[in-house]
Image (spheres, rainbow, N blue to C red):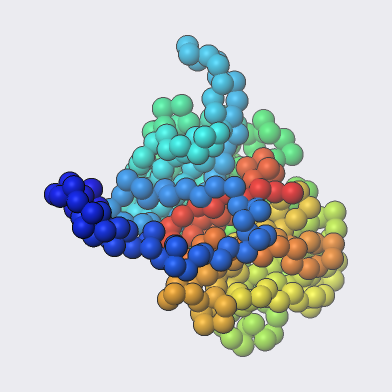
Amino acid sequence: MDAVTGCLQTQRSIIAASKLAYFDKIKHEVPMMVPKTTSETLKHKINPSLDLAEPQTVHVLLYTPGHLTYNDSGGMMNPKLWVALSGGKVVVFDAASWSMLQDCIQVGESQLNCMLGLVQEQVWIGSQDSVIYIIDTHSMSCNKQLTEHRHEVTGLTMDTRDQHSSQQTYSCSCDGTILQWDSASLKVKRQFYLSCDRLSSIQIHNGTLWCCCGDSIMELKKSGTPQKRIALPDDFQSMSSSFSCFIVIPERGQLWTGCADSGELCLWHTNNHRHPSKRISLPGSSGVTCMIRVKDQLWVGCRGRAGVGGQCDGQLRSQVMVMDPESHTVAKELQAHSDSIQTLCSAEDRYVLSGSARRDGKIAIWKVE
Protein backbone atom coordinates (compact mmCIF):
# COMPACT_ATOMS: atom_id res chain seq x y z
CA MET A 1 0.00 0.00 0.00
CA ASP A 2 2.82 2.42 0.88
CA ALA A 3 4.58 1.59 -2.40
CA VAL A 4 1.47 2.26 -4.51
CA THR A 5 0.66 5.59 -2.86
CA GLY A 6 4.35 6.55 -3.09
CA CYS A 7 4.37 6.12 -6.87
CA LEU A 8 1.72 8.73 -7.60
CA GLN A 9 0.21 11.18 -5.15
CA THR A 10 -3.16 11.05 -6.90
CA GLN A 11 -6.66 9.95 -6.03
CA ARG A 12 -6.27 6.92 -8.35
CA SER A 13 -3.28 5.56 -6.41
CA ILE A 14 -5.12 6.03 -3.11
CA ILE A 15 -8.11 4.06 -4.48
CA ALA A 16 -5.73 1.34 -5.75
CA ALA A 17 -4.03 1.15 -2.35
CA SER A 18 -7.37 0.92 -0.57
CA LYS A 19 -8.28 -2.08 -2.75
CA LEU A 20 -5.10 -3.76 -1.54
CA ALA A 21 -6.36 -3.42 2.01
CA TYR A 22 -8.19 -6.73 1.66
CA PHE A 23 -8.72 -7.49 5.33
CA ASP A 24 -9.81 -3.93 6.02
CA LYS A 25 -12.34 -4.24 3.17
CA ILE A 26 -13.64 -7.57 4.47
CA LYS A 27 -13.97 -6.11 7.96
CA HIS A 28 -16.17 -3.27 6.69
CA GLU A 29 -18.26 -5.45 4.38
CA VAL A 30 -18.71 -8.42 6.74
CA PRO A 31 -18.31 -7.35 10.36
CA MET A 32 -16.78 -10.09 12.51
CA MET A 33 -19.54 -11.43 14.70
CA VAL A 34 -17.81 -11.96 18.04
CA PRO A 35 -20.13 -13.49 20.63
CA LYS A 36 -20.83 -11.19 23.57
CA THR A 37 -19.43 -13.64 26.14
CA THR A 38 -16.17 -13.87 24.18
CA SER A 39 -15.77 -10.08 23.78
CA GLU A 40 -16.44 -9.54 27.50
CA THR A 41 -13.99 -12.24 28.61
CA LEU A 42 -11.16 -11.81 26.07
CA LYS A 43 -8.58 -9.36 27.41
CA HIS A 44 -5.84 -9.59 24.78
CA LYS A 45 -4.35 -11.73 21.98
CA ILE A 46 -0.66 -12.14 21.21
CA ASN A 47 1.22 -13.71 18.32
CA PRO A 48 4.31 -15.65 19.51
CA SER A 49 5.39 -16.35 15.89
CA LEU A 50 5.77 -12.66 15.03
CA ASP A 51 9.51 -12.91 14.31
CA LEU A 52 9.30 -16.30 12.57
CA ALA A 53 8.79 -17.09 8.88
CA GLU A 54 5.41 -18.77 9.43
CA PRO A 55 2.94 -19.37 12.29
CA GLN A 56 3.89 -22.12 14.72
CA THR A 57 1.81 -24.40 16.92
CA VAL A 58 1.71 -23.26 20.55
CA HIS A 59 2.45 -26.61 22.24
CA VAL A 60 2.83 -25.56 25.90
CA LEU A 61 2.29 -22.41 27.97
CA LEU A 62 3.77 -21.70 31.42
CA TYR A 63 3.27 -18.64 33.62
CA THR A 64 5.91 -17.88 36.26
CA PRO A 65 5.06 -15.23 38.89
CA GLY A 66 7.13 -12.12 39.50
CA HIS A 67 9.31 -11.79 42.59
CA LEU A 68 11.89 -9.57 44.26
CA THR A 69 15.42 -10.03 42.93
CA TYR A 70 18.54 -10.04 45.05
CA ASN A 71 21.11 -9.56 42.32
CA ASP A 72 23.11 -6.40 41.61
CA SER A 73 20.24 -4.64 39.90
CA GLY A 74 17.80 -5.36 42.74
CA GLY A 75 14.14 -4.53 42.32
CA MET A 76 11.35 -6.65 40.94
CA MET A 77 11.48 -9.42 38.36
CA ASN A 78 8.28 -9.27 36.33
CA PRO A 79 6.08 -12.33 35.80
CA LYS A 80 6.80 -14.21 32.58
CA LEU A 81 4.90 -16.23 30.03
CA TRP A 82 6.94 -19.09 28.54
CA VAL A 83 5.73 -20.34 25.16
CA ALA A 84 6.91 -23.63 23.63
CA LEU A 85 6.60 -23.52 19.82
CA SER A 86 7.40 -26.18 17.22
CA GLY A 87 10.92 -27.51 16.73
CA GLY A 88 12.24 -26.87 20.25
CA LYS A 89 11.72 -23.10 20.17
CA VAL A 90 10.79 -21.21 23.36
CA VAL A 91 9.78 -17.55 23.33
CA VAL A 92 9.24 -15.51 26.51
CA PHE A 93 6.85 -12.64 27.17
CA ASP A 94 6.72 -10.12 30.00
CA ALA A 95 3.39 -11.08 31.57
CA ALA A 96 2.87 -7.55 32.93
CA SER A 97 2.94 -5.84 29.51
CA TRP A 98 2.60 -8.92 27.19
CA SER A 99 5.63 -7.67 25.24
CA MET A 100 8.21 -10.17 23.98
CA LEU A 101 11.33 -10.46 26.17
CA GLN A 102 13.19 -13.23 24.39
CA ASP A 103 12.46 -14.08 20.78
CA CYS A 104 13.91 -17.60 20.70
CA ILE A 105 15.60 -19.92 23.18
CA GLN A 106 16.47 -23.13 21.32
CA VAL A 107 16.18 -26.34 23.38
CA GLY A 108 16.85 -29.29 21.09
CA GLU A 109 15.05 -29.69 17.78
CA SER A 110 12.07 -31.83 18.85
CA GLN A 111 8.56 -31.05 19.99
CA LEU A 112 8.30 -29.81 23.59
CA ASN A 113 5.58 -31.51 25.65
CA CYS A 114 5.55 -29.99 29.14
CA MET A 115 6.99 -27.18 31.29
CA LEU A 116 7.33 -26.63 35.04
CA GLY A 117 8.49 -23.56 36.97
CA LEU A 118 10.58 -24.29 40.07
CA VAL A 119 11.26 -22.04 43.05
CA GLN A 120 15.01 -22.20 42.39
CA GLU A 121 14.43 -19.83 39.44
CA GLN A 122 14.48 -22.62 36.90
CA VAL A 123 12.08 -23.72 34.20
CA TRP A 124 12.13 -27.43 33.36
CA ILE A 125 11.03 -28.42 29.84
CA GLY A 126 10.27 -32.00 28.80
CA SER A 127 10.98 -32.87 25.16
CA GLN A 128 10.07 -35.56 22.67
CA ASP A 129 13.81 -36.29 22.39
CA SER A 130 13.74 -37.75 25.98
CA VAL A 131 15.70 -34.83 27.52
CA ILE A 132 14.56 -32.46 30.29
CA TYR A 133 16.05 -29.04 29.49
CA ILE A 134 16.57 -26.57 32.35
CA ILE A 135 16.43 -22.83 31.66
CA ASP A 136 17.83 -20.31 34.12
CA THR A 137 15.19 -17.58 34.47
CA HIS A 138 17.81 -14.85 35.03
CA SER A 139 20.17 -15.57 32.13
CA MET A 140 17.27 -16.87 29.97
CA SER A 141 19.56 -19.61 28.68
CA CYS A 142 19.49 -23.41 28.83
CA ASN A 143 22.43 -24.36 31.03
CA LYS A 144 21.56 -27.90 32.20
CA GLN A 145 20.05 -31.07 30.78
CA LEU A 146 18.64 -34.14 32.53
CA THR A 147 19.10 -37.25 30.39
CA GLU A 148 17.86 -40.06 32.64
CA HIS A 149 14.70 -40.75 30.63
CA ARG A 150 15.04 -43.12 27.67
CA HIS A 151 11.80 -42.17 25.91
CA GLU A 152 9.75 -39.05 25.15
CA VAL A 153 9.21 -36.93 28.29
CA THR A 154 5.46 -36.28 28.55
CA GLY A 155 4.83 -34.86 32.03
CA LEU A 156 6.31 -32.80 34.88
CA THR A 157 4.74 -32.02 38.25
CA MET A 158 5.63 -30.99 41.79
CA ASP A 159 3.87 -31.07 45.14
CA THR A 160 2.78 -27.46 45.59
CA ARG A 161 1.81 -28.02 49.23
CA ASP A 162 5.44 -27.34 50.13
CA GLN A 163 6.85 -24.63 47.85
CA HIS A 164 10.38 -25.11 49.17
CA SER A 165 10.51 -28.90 49.10
CA SER A 166 13.22 -30.22 46.81
CA GLN A 167 11.91 -33.76 47.28
CA GLN A 168 8.63 -33.61 45.37
CA THR A 169 9.42 -33.01 41.69
CA TYR A 170 8.35 -35.78 39.30
CA SER A 171 8.76 -36.44 35.59
CA CYS A 172 7.30 -39.14 33.39
CA SER A 173 7.96 -40.55 29.92
CA CYS A 174 5.61 -42.23 27.46
CA ASP A 175 6.95 -45.75 28.20
CA GLY A 176 5.57 -45.56 31.78
CA THR A 177 8.75 -44.52 33.63
CA ILE A 178 8.25 -42.07 36.52
CA LEU A 179 11.28 -40.38 38.13
CA GLN A 180 11.29 -38.49 41.43
CA TRP A 181 13.95 -35.77 41.53
CA ASP A 182 15.84 -33.87 44.17
CA SER A 183 15.54 -30.55 42.35
CA ALA A 184 18.43 -28.99 44.30
CA SER A 185 21.05 -31.63 43.41
CA LEU A 186 19.29 -32.68 40.13
CA LYS A 187 19.70 -36.32 41.15
CA VAL A 188 17.07 -39.05 40.77
CA LYS A 189 15.80 -40.06 44.20
CA ARG A 190 13.42 -42.78 43.10
CA GLN A 191 12.31 -44.49 39.91
CA PHE A 192 9.29 -46.65 39.20
CA TYR A 193 7.58 -48.08 36.17
CA LEU A 194 3.90 -48.16 35.29
CA SER A 195 2.69 -50.72 32.78
CA CYS A 196 0.35 -48.87 30.40
CA ASP A 197 -0.37 -48.00 26.76
CA ARG A 198 1.13 -44.52 26.89
CA LEU A 199 1.81 -42.41 29.97
CA SER A 200 0.92 -38.88 28.79
CA SER A 201 0.78 -36.79 32.00
CA ILE A 202 1.06 -36.86 35.80
CA GLN A 203 -0.36 -34.75 38.64
CA ILE A 204 -0.03 -34.75 42.44
CA HIS A 205 -3.13 -34.41 44.63
CA ASN A 206 -3.09 -34.80 48.42
CA GLY A 207 0.23 -36.61 48.31
CA THR A 208 -0.73 -39.20 45.68
CA LEU A 209 0.25 -39.37 42.01
CA TRP A 210 -2.43 -39.43 39.31
CA CYS A 211 -1.39 -40.67 35.87
CA CYS A 212 -3.04 -40.38 32.45
CA CYS A 213 -2.39 -43.73 30.79
CA GLY A 214 -4.34 -43.72 27.55
CA ASP A 215 -6.87 -46.46 28.36
CA SER A 216 -7.04 -45.55 32.07
CA ILE A 217 -6.39 -42.96 34.77
CA MET A 218 -4.37 -44.42 37.65
CA GLU A 219 -3.79 -43.22 41.20
CA LEU A 220 -0.47 -44.29 42.76
CA LYS A 221 0.95 -44.09 46.24
CA LYS A 222 4.23 -42.17 46.37
CA SER A 223 6.00 -45.53 46.52
CA GLY A 224 4.64 -46.21 43.04
CA THR A 225 2.07 -48.80 44.15
CA PRO A 226 -1.21 -48.49 42.17
CA GLN A 227 -4.23 -47.98 44.43
CA LYS A 228 -6.96 -46.98 41.95
CA ARG A 229 -7.61 -47.51 38.25
CA ILE A 230 -10.35 -45.74 36.29
CA ALA A 231 -10.79 -47.52 32.96
CA LEU A 232 -11.94 -45.95 29.70
CA PRO A 233 -15.73 -46.53 29.29
CA ASP A 234 -16.58 -49.54 27.11
CA ASP A 235 -18.04 -47.54 24.23
CA PHE A 236 -14.85 -45.43 24.05
CA GLN A 237 -12.68 -48.56 24.04
CA SER A 238 -14.62 -49.92 21.07
CA MET A 239 -13.72 -46.71 19.17
CA SER A 240 -10.00 -47.13 20.02
CA SER A 241 -10.23 -43.85 21.91
CA SER A 242 -7.96 -42.77 24.77
CA PHE A 243 -7.94 -40.28 27.63
CA SER A 244 -6.23 -37.02 26.64
CA CYS A 245 -6.48 -35.10 29.93
CA PHE A 246 -8.02 -35.13 33.40
CA ILE A 247 -8.67 -32.99 36.46
CA VAL A 248 -9.02 -34.20 40.06
CA ILE A 249 -11.07 -32.14 42.53
CA PRO A 250 -10.27 -33.94 45.81
CA GLU A 251 -12.62 -31.95 48.08
CA ARG A 252 -15.58 -32.83 45.83
CA GLY A 253 -14.42 -36.40 45.25
CA GLN A 254 -14.57 -35.69 41.50
CA LEU A 255 -12.48 -36.80 38.55
CA TRP A 256 -13.14 -35.13 35.19
CA THR A 257 -11.79 -36.76 32.03
CA GLY A 258 -11.65 -35.85 28.35
CA CYS A 259 -10.77 -37.73 25.17
CA ALA A 260 -9.17 -36.21 22.07
CA ASP A 261 -11.82 -37.67 19.73
CA SER A 262 -14.97 -37.19 21.82
CA GLY A 263 -16.89 -33.96 22.29
CA GLU A 264 -17.97 -34.76 25.83
CA LEU A 265 -16.56 -34.77 29.34
CA CYS A 266 -16.96 -37.68 31.74
CA LEU A 267 -17.48 -36.99 35.45
CA TRP A 268 -16.46 -39.76 37.85
CA HIS A 269 -16.76 -40.06 41.62
CA THR A 270 -13.41 -41.18 43.00
CA ASN A 271 -15.02 -43.59 45.50
CA ASN A 272 -17.10 -45.25 42.75
CA HIS A 273 -15.04 -45.38 39.60
CA ARG A 274 -16.46 -48.30 37.63
CA HIS A 275 -18.66 -46.06 35.48
CA PRO A 276 -18.82 -42.30 34.91
CA SER A 277 -21.62 -40.77 36.97
CA LYS A 278 -22.35 -38.21 34.27
CA ARG A 279 -21.44 -37.25 30.72
CA ILE A 280 -21.56 -33.62 29.65
CA SER A 281 -21.77 -32.80 25.94
CA LEU A 282 -19.66 -29.86 24.76
CA PRO A 283 -21.46 -27.99 21.94
CA GLY A 284 -19.54 -27.64 18.67
CA SER A 285 -16.64 -29.78 19.92
CA SER A 286 -15.19 -32.92 18.34
CA GLY A 287 -12.61 -33.55 21.05
CA VAL A 288 -11.07 -32.40 24.33
CA THR A 289 -7.36 -31.58 24.21
CA CYS A 290 -6.54 -30.01 27.61
CA MET A 291 -8.07 -28.99 30.96
CA ILE A 292 -7.04 -26.88 33.94
CA ARG A 293 -8.70 -25.95 37.21
CA VAL A 294 -8.93 -22.24 38.03
CA LYS A 295 -10.60 -21.20 41.29
CA ASP A 296 -13.73 -23.34 41.34
CA GLN A 297 -14.02 -23.62 37.57
CA LEU A 298 -12.79 -26.03 34.94
CA TRP A 299 -11.41 -24.51 31.75
CA VAL A 300 -11.51 -26.98 28.86
CA GLY A 301 -9.67 -26.65 25.54
CA CYS A 302 -11.46 -28.22 22.57
CA ARG A 303 -11.08 -29.11 18.95
CA GLY A 304 -13.86 -27.69 16.76
CA ARG A 305 -16.26 -29.86 14.80
CA ALA A 306 -15.93 -29.18 11.07
CA GLY A 307 -19.14 -28.23 9.30
CA VAL A 308 -21.40 -27.97 12.37
CA GLY A 309 -20.75 -24.53 13.78
CA GLY A 310 -17.08 -25.40 13.96
CA GLN A 311 -16.19 -24.28 10.45
CA CYS A 312 -16.36 -20.73 9.13
CA ASP A 313 -14.74 -19.40 5.95
CA GLY A 314 -12.89 -22.72 5.61
CA GLN A 315 -11.43 -22.36 9.10
CA LEU A 316 -12.01 -24.49 12.15
CA ARG A 317 -13.44 -22.57 15.10
CA SER A 318 -12.29 -24.14 18.35
CA GLN A 319 -13.66 -23.17 21.73
CA VAL A 320 -12.56 -22.83 25.31
CA MET A 321 -15.36 -24.06 27.60
CA VAL A 322 -15.69 -22.90 31.20
CA MET A 323 -17.41 -25.56 33.32
CA ASP A 324 -19.13 -25.25 36.68
CA PRO A 325 -18.18 -28.41 38.63
CA GLU A 326 -21.08 -27.95 41.06
CA SER A 327 -23.91 -27.78 38.52
CA HIS A 328 -21.99 -29.88 35.93
CA THR A 329 -22.89 -27.37 33.21
CA VAL A 330 -21.09 -25.24 30.61
CA ALA A 331 -20.95 -21.74 32.11
CA LYS A 332 -19.22 -20.07 29.11
CA GLU A 333 -18.34 -20.86 25.51
CA LEU A 334 -15.39 -18.75 24.36
CA GLN A 335 -14.31 -18.43 20.71
CA ALA A 336 -10.97 -16.90 19.75
CA HIS A 337 -9.03 -19.55 17.82
CA SER A 338 -9.26 -20.84 14.25
CA ASP A 339 -7.49 -24.12 15.01
CA SER A 340 -7.62 -26.65 17.85
CA ILE A 341 -6.67 -25.52 21.35
CA GLN A 342 -3.37 -27.17 22.33
CA THR A 343 -2.66 -25.85 25.82
CA LEU A 344 -4.09 -23.85 28.72
CA CYS A 345 -2.40 -22.19 31.67
CA SER A 346 -3.45 -19.97 34.55
CA ALA A 347 -1.85 -16.67 35.58
CA GLU A 348 -2.37 -16.57 39.35
CA ASP A 349 -6.09 -17.39 38.89
CA ARG A 350 -6.66 -13.90 37.40
CA TYR A 351 -6.25 -14.86 33.76
CA VAL A 352 -6.35 -18.04 31.70
CA LEU A 353 -4.19 -18.27 28.57
CA SER A 354 -5.02 -20.55 25.64
CA GLY A 355 -2.67 -21.48 22.80
CA SER A 356 -3.65 -23.06 19.49
CA ALA A 357 -2.31 -25.12 16.60
CA ARG A 358 -0.42 -23.49 13.75
CA ARG A 359 -3.27 -22.51 11.38
CA ASP A 360 -4.12 -20.01 14.12
CA GLY A 361 -0.94 -20.01 16.23
CA LYS A 362 -2.13 -17.29 18.61
CA ILE A 363 -2.40 -16.99 22.39
CA ALA A 364 -5.64 -15.65 23.86
CA ILE A 365 -5.69 -14.08 27.34
CA TRP A 366 -9.00 -14.47 29.18
CA LYS A 367 -10.26 -12.77 32.34
CA VAL A 368 -11.31 -15.09 35.17
CA GLU A 369 -14.41 -14.19 37.15
The image quarter in which residue 182 lies: top right
Q: Give the residue displayed 41% in from the left and 45% down from the top.
A: 90
Q: Is residue 108 visible?
A: no
Above or below — where is 158 with respect to 137? Answer: below
Residue 286, x across and y down, in percent: 58, 77
Residue 365 x, y percent position in the rendering = 57, 49
Instruction: Spot the residue most to the front.
Output: 11
Q: Please determine whether, in this image, residue 122 is positioned above or below residue 77.
A: below
> Which residue is located at x 57 percent, y 37 percent?
64
Q: Position of residue 170 (x, y in %)?
A: 60, 47
Q: Is residue 98 visible?
A: yes
- Decide: is 178 above or below 163: below
Q: Nearer the viewer, residue 138 or 3?
A: 3
Task: Indicate whether 256 appears above or below 236.
Answer: above
Viewer-nearest residue: 345 or 8: 8
Q: Is residue 239 left or right of residue 29?
A: right
